[in-house]
Image (cartoon, rainbow, N blue to C red):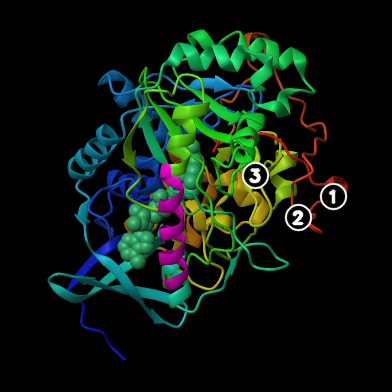
């Protein structure tokens, strides 16, 4: 059945989170007519609510560059950010002004000639055999059919693929459960020095998973006075005391978050619900309601119990729920936990990552984590196996539940997105299918445009290792006695035991 299109574009990007913004920018700068559609009224998605983790690997080498690096450079130059701060678990954290990022993203879209439709909800996929011919959107103007040569699904939920009947998976293999979601909120009025002093005081046990590595702890903590931004996951005893006193009843066992670069600000990443299906509207609404209810008790806990927070105020609740995991579109290759841990170098590498596998448990408590070596992401994991012209970047790439635990952080999403935006533009420029573009040409183009695919990674950063310490690839086992039964099942034969270790987010 032929469709009348209200609008046609060469490259259509659905969803304007970190992945969508970067994909659209890459496509437009490489010469494609590009349309970006977003259901909210701002660009950036979750990346406009959180600091960005994982620009660096365990050896403190910068594994994501290119457009993501350009955003960092410009935010720092504008005085809206400080350079990424190194961290032994998460590689690095980049703290910046979230509103400045939204403004910058909009400006960059305009400068590159990307047409942006805000408050435009993708509702359906138009498909002819193995081609996605376009999508249907719903706006105040009404329902519109948008035609496209290439479609990039950056919805975070794999919406375009799912409605188009393409293959996807969701959550853990054994039960489909996804990582627990969090509604993050920003706290102001924090006394930074009091907080830093508590982190240095062994009685508070800041990041207790560092216990087996006293050398790393000593080195890292010695830097806290000078680190504008640092990651938080600890103070478990304090939370337990508040719980025992009947003053805290939330499903979270640690203070989790990030000390932001603004002197008095802290991003709390502590609300939590279990069993969410992010593609079910009742579920999402109930989860939102439950997450909102946790904000006040957590604020009260901070004020009464946590050093440096006695005068703190609630500054902002994120405008969107933080869904860590949803549908993953099955591509020509499924990136696995093993690939990530082994630091696999794929022949069709188009981006990189080095962030630990960081799984906020779908059941039980806190997180499960495995350190990784700098790894590459193959183009095959960014193209739907069932379609000629559907690519994906961000949370919904073709990877297992475990691999997504690493690839999901913002810089790594942006790296994938630069690759898919670029290859889409190359395809439409040459009137070819994305699969017919020479991977070698794509890699050269990405390298020319500043992306990192291993060509300039260099040696471990010994100076940083000396300064901040380095974790072994195989973390020591540490159990808190409150984790759920083994969740990861069959996925890593050599690493079956579940371990409680620290998380950044
Ligand atoms: C609670 C939480 C804490 C985290 N902490 C960190 C951290 O500290 N640092 C870090 O680097 N990473 C962190 N992560 C991971 C990271 O934030 C996300 O994985 C990443 O931002 C995903 O980017 P994305 O572009 O794929 O998805 P999103 O940011 O979710 O973007 C998807 C976009 O698509 C839009 N969209 C969805 N459906 C439709 C539709 N039907 N029509 C139109 N638009 C649509 C959405 O509105 C959204 O803007 C965290 C994640 C969560 C959930």
The image position of residue 153, as x and y in percent, is: 41, 61
According to the image, label 1 marks what residue?
496
Most common SS among magenta residues: helix
According to the image, label 2 marks what residue?
488
According to the image, label 3 marks what residue?
366
Let me know if residue 130 appears in the view.
Answer: yes
Let me know if residue 448 appears in the view.
Answer: no
User: Most extreme residue toward the right, as rendered?
Assistant: 494
Q: Are marks 2 and 3 in contact (CB under 8 Å)?
A: no
Choose mark 1 or mark 3, whichever is in front: 3
Please give the range of residues in magenta. Answer: 282-296
Of residues 12 and 278, the one nearer the viewer is 278
Residue drawn 59% across the image and 63% down it? 275
Q: Are marks 1 and 2 in contact (CB under 8 Å)?
A: yes
Q: Rounded to the nearest whole Å, what is the CA distance between mark 2 and mark 3?
A: 14 Å
Q: Describe the element under mark 3 as helix, strand or loop.
A: loop
Of labels 2 and 3, earlier in sequence is 3
Of labels 1 and 2, earlier in sequence is 2
Choose mark 2 or mark 3, whichever is in front: 3
Describe residue 252's horizontal placement relative to residue 125 as left or right.
right
């Amino acid at each position: 059945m032929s469709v009348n299109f209200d609008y046609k574009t060469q490259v259509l990007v659905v969803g304007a989170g970190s992945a969508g913004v970067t994909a659209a920018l890459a496509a437009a700068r490489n010469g494609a007519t590009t349309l970006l559609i977003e259901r909210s009224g701002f660009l950036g998605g979750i990346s406009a609510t959180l600091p960005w983790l994982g620009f660096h690997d365990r050896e403190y080498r910068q594994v994501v560059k290119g457009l993501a690096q350009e955003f960092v450079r410009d935010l720092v130059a504008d005085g809206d950010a400080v350079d990424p701060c190194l961290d032994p678990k998460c590689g690095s954290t980049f703290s910046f002004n979230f509103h400045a990022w939204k403004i910058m993203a909009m400006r960059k879209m305009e400068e590159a000639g990307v047409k942006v439709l805000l408050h435009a909800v993708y509702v359906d996929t138009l498909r002819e055999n193995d081609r996605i011919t376009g999508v249907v959107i719903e706006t105040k103007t009404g329902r519109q059919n948008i035609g496209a040569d290439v479609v990039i699904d950056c919805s975070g939920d794999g919406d375009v693929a799912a409605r188009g009947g393409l293959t996807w998976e969701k959550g853990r293999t054994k039960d489909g459960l996804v990582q627990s979601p969090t509604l993050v909120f920003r706290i102001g009025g924090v006394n930074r020095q009091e907080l830093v002093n508590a982190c240095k005081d062994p009685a508070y046990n800041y990041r207790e998973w560092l216990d087996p590595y006293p050398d790393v702890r000593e080195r890292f903590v010695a830097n806290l006075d000078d680190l504008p931004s640092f990651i938080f996951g600890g103070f478990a005893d304090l939370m337990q005391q508040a719980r025992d006193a009947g003053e805290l009843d939330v499903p979270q066992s640690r203070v989790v978050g990030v000390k932001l670069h603004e002197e008095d600000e802290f991003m709390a990443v502590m609300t939590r619900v279990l069993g969410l299906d992010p593609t079910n509207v009742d579920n999402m609404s109930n989860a939102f309601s439950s997450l909102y209810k946790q904000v006040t008790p957590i604020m009260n806990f901070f004020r009464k119990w946590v050093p440096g927070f006695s005068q703190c105020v609630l500054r902002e609740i994120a405008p969107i729920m933080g869904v860590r995991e949803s549908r993953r579109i099955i591509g020509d290759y499924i990136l696995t936990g093993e690939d990530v841990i082994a630091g696999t170098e794929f022949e069709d590498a188009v981006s990189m990552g080095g962030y630990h596998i960081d799984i906020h448990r779908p059941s039980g408590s806190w997180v499960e984590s495995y350190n990784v070596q700098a790894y590459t992401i193959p183009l095959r994991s960014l193209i739907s196996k069932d379609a000629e012209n559907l690519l994906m970047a961000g949370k919904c790439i073709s990877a297992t539940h475990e691999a997504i635990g690493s690839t999901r952080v913002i810089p790594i999403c942006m790296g994938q997105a630069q690759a898919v935006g670029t290859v889409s533009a190359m395809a439409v420029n040459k009137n070819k299918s994305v699969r017919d573009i020479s991977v070698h040409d794509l890699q050269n183009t990405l390298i020319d445009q500043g992306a990192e695919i291993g060509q300039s990674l260099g040696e471990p950063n010994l100076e940083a290792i000396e300064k901040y310490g380095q974790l072994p690839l195989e973390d020591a086992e540490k159990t808190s006695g409150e984790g759920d039964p083994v969740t990861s099942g069959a996925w890593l034969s050599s690493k079956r035991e579940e371990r409680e270790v620290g998380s950044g987010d």
